[in-house]
Amino acid sequence: MFGKLFGGNAAEIMSINPRQAQERLAADAGKGTVILIDVREPWEYRRGHARGARNIPLSQLGRRTQEVPADCETLLICQSGHRSMQAAKILQEAGRTRIVNITGGTTVWKMHNLPME
């Protein structure tokens, strides 16, 4: 199922918009098969983040990949979508295959009034 959606090289990293990400998270509620990781720095995360997001900063991700479950679809968010794409590449190189970048990041998430903490 994920072969075409989640490829083996950076050109094949799937991207979705914040509304689509929120829909996936809502559909997964309580199942634990989709996780959301905010790769911004802790001070950025503390200023407000998408509801339910775990914070693993891009600057630490390379040494914290074991904290990202291999059996979950992993949605990555940052401020605009650039750092989260870098994070996607790091996780892909670490063997994760179900990686999704959220385009527009927290900026667009807020613009659409999606749930924040």
Image: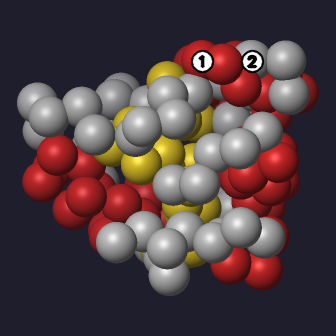
Residue drawn where x is 43% and y is 55% of the image: 110
Question: Where is residue 95 shown, x and y percent of the image?
Answer: 71, 44
Residue drawn where x is 52% and y is 35% of the image: 70
Q: Quadrant of the C terminus?
A: top left
Q: Is residue 45 above or below residue 70?
A: above
Circle 1 residues within 10 Å: few <14, some 14–19, many ≥20: few
Q: Which residue does the numbered mark 1 point to in the structure image? A: 67
Instruction: Tell me where residue 105 sits by quadrant.
Output: bottom right
Secondary element type, mark 2: loop
Q: Is residue 15 above or below residue 65?
A: below
Residue drawn where x is 40% and y is 40% of the image: 72
Q: Quadrant of the N terminus?
A: bottom left
Which disc, if any, is residue 64? 2
Question: Where is residue 18 shown, x and y percent of the image?
Answer: 41, 64
Question: Where is residue 101 shown, x and y percent of the image?
Answer: 59, 61
Type of the residue with mark 2: Arg
Looking at this view, is 97 or 100 the one in front? 97
Left or right: 40 in relation to 69: right
Circle 2 residues within 10 Å: few <14, some 14–19, many ≥20: few
Residue drawn where x is 59% and y is 54% of the image: 97
Type of the residue with mark 1: Glu
Q: Is residue 49 above or below residue 75?
A: above
Left or right: 43 in relation to 37: right
Query: Which colour style is shown?
Result: secondary structure
The answer to whether residue 16 is seen in the rendering is yes
Q: Is there CB contact under 8 Å for labels 1 and 2? A: yes
Question: Where is residue 47 shown, x and y percent of the image?
Answer: 57, 25
The residues bearing labels 1 and 2 have C-alpha atoms spaced at a distance of 6 Å
The answer to whether residue 113 is seen in the rendering is no
Which disc, if any, is residue 77? none
